Amino acid sequence: MLNLTPRYTKTCIDELPTALQPLAAQSLTLARLYAARGITEPAELDIGLSGLLPAEQLHGVAEAVRLLDVAIDDGLRILIVGDFDCDGATSTALMMRALTKMGAVVDFLVPDRFKYGYGLTPEIVELGIKTYQPEMIVTVDNGISSHEGVARAQADGITVIITDHHLTTKETPPAEAVVNPNQLDCHFTSKALVGVGVAFYVLGRLAKLRREAGKSTVQVSQYMDLVALGTIADVGVLDKNNRILVHHGLAAIRQGRCCLGVLALLEQAGRDPKQLHAQDFGFVLGPRINAAGRMDNMRIGIECLLTEDWSTAQRLAQELEQLNRTRRQVEGEMRAQADSIVQTLAVDANADDASTRAGESSDIIIHNQSEKTTDNDHKRSIVLYQDDWHQGVIGIVAGRLKESHYLPSIVFAPADTQKTGDEDAIKGSARSIAGVHIRDAIEQVAERYPNLISHFGGHAMAAGLTLKRHNFEAFEAAFDDVMAQIDHTVFAEQKFTDGPLQASDFSLWFAEHLAEASIWGHGFAPPIFDGIFEVLSFKVLKDKHLKLSLRYPDVQYPIEAIYFNFDSSAWDYRAKQVHVLFQLDINEWNGKQSLQLMVKDLAVVENS
């Protein structure tokens, strides 16, 4: 049997919160799902725009709006400085579209990640001055740590407005206005806004101010497609506020009320906008836009989101499609190399264990498919570097390593010497597991060894850093020392379940209803269920996918299931019953739909 952790243990209507019992009378399963995610009142599921938190809660928003209003009226040259990921691209496009409609003189600049790195650096300010002669700089999705860049801009008399969402433990830069729900002294209830969400709030408040004053303005809610895309692509926590934003952006795209670039990207991916789901922002649209920043320059992605010409949108979407294919190829090669390195280290670690049975190992332990756990005598992180790895893909590779080994992972590649002037500089991208705040862990290393890390920043689950190549081994050891202080139970992966389904839930209707019942994603986990099924038949596809035909008690028809990338050597061909962890899915083939279980894990029931 699988070792699973129930998200919710109440199984009957009377045990649920009183306010959810009417819903439970219609669907006990759906009511259980909501209760397990902290929903106690139906009002918490309301998705009207009126349910959004008020902008006035955002510290600094009033001053930012006042400065922007004056800049538009006075015709000041405004320069938007964005980030080179999808959140930064959508934030920049949103600012450009809304401010232009309000009559602003505005342009944008996105740092080339390979030449200038991240944020409002002095070099970016100087490039902006040389190219655009701005009188005001507005950052989106960056700037909260850019003290030097702010000082450089202000030295030339440039007004700086920072809009960001990244975490900081230090004082904010002395910009003329700073809007960030995660800055010190900000009491905005939701800390989960991503960069494009912060930009949306600033622009919405600005539009309201100008509307009340009878000035040129715009309905900012018409750009919700950009807000939804950036929120999901940046893995924003889906609290109620973000769910409202994503819901309306998703609805806009399904109705064709979105920028042409989004439609062109969906065309490239072969997706029907009317059938779009929230997860498609992260798996279909996001990677194609991110490919511009990873492999070339994010300006291509932003221009795709800005163009009002369909043929131009198609051309730019095709360029992004090709960049994404190149990214996938490079990523595949790097992942194979990384897996090989980790496998080698695991063999060495096991050999050391077998020969010594004592002392601390300095190597990485590999986890099998069913249980990903670490041992106190082994490293609790994966930290890798290769001279020929591509800087634009290290974050993806780190994420894959984290997923496959359930360990905090950091992957480094050489930094661009044109930017640093230092051939010894390397840049790293980190991804973490639940319970390990990766940015804070890196900060602990920086505090213990002040000369080890040149720069760092990020979130609980993702971060970036720069250090010298000759400091790599020292950083690797120091980081693992920090991991060693964390309770070992954190490194044992928990697999959650929403419990069993009722027989009536195994239907196309319920699968469709479930998909549309809410915006599922990070922080509002997609429903996942488990149950014991009879095995009617099976086959292995392409030597790596397990296809099953199953029977469930009181269900009168076979239920199809698929387990992608399954280790076929682990399958017991004599199995009569299996315990399955799965998500409900709808399989479309030759114009027909059928219910399908997407298997996430399974175990043969003993004595079956």
Image (tube, rainbow, N blue to C red):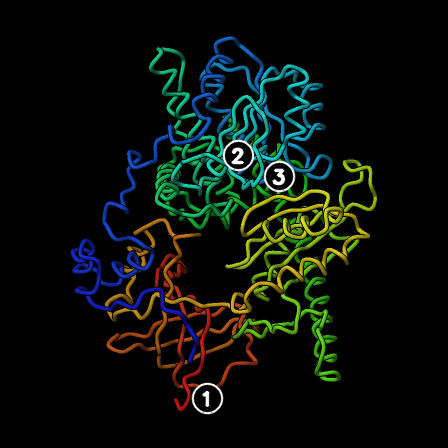
User: Element under label 2?
Assistant: loop
Q: For mark 1, what is the residue? A: 574
Label 1: how many residues lie within 10 Å, few (<14), some (14-19) or many (20+)?
Answer: few
Give the camera-side residue of 323 and 201: 201
Q: Residue at x 68, y 65 (%)?
A: 339
Q: Residue at x 38, y 35 (%)?
A: 256
Placement of 103 over or under 238, stated as above or below: above
User: Element under label 1?
Assistant: loop
Give residue 322's position: percent from left, percent from top: 63, 44
Q: Residue at x 17, y 57 (%)?
A: 18
Label 3: how many residues lie within 10 Å, few (<14), some (14-19) or many (20+)?
Answer: some
Give residue 362's position: percent from left, percent from top: 72, 69
Q: Quadrant of residue 4?
A: bottom left
Decide which of tag 3 and tag 2 comes sooner along the chain.
2
Q: For mark 2, what is the residue? A: 164
Placement of 563 over or under 27, stated as above or below: below
Residue 265 visible in the snapshot? yes
Q: Is residue 419 left or right of residue 278?
A: right
Give residue 358's position: percent from left, percent from top: 71, 81
Q: Amino acid at mark 2?
A: Asp
Task: Tell which residue pokes out farthest to the top in this image.
Answer: 74
Q: What label does residue 319 carry, if any?
A: 3
Q: Mark 1 or mark 3, which is nearer to you?
A: 1
> What whole-number distance in Å separates the C-alpha atoms at marks 3 and 2?
29 Å
> What whole-number distance in Å separates the C-alpha atoms at marks 2 and 1?
56 Å
Give the camera-side residue of 600 and 524: 524
Q: Amino acid at mark 3?
A: Glu
Q: Residue at x 17, y 64 (%)?
A: 14
Q: Quadrant of residue 43?
A: top left
Give residue 344's position: percent from left, percent from top: 73, 71
Q: Amino acid at mark 1?
A: Arg
Residue 315 visible in the snapshot? no
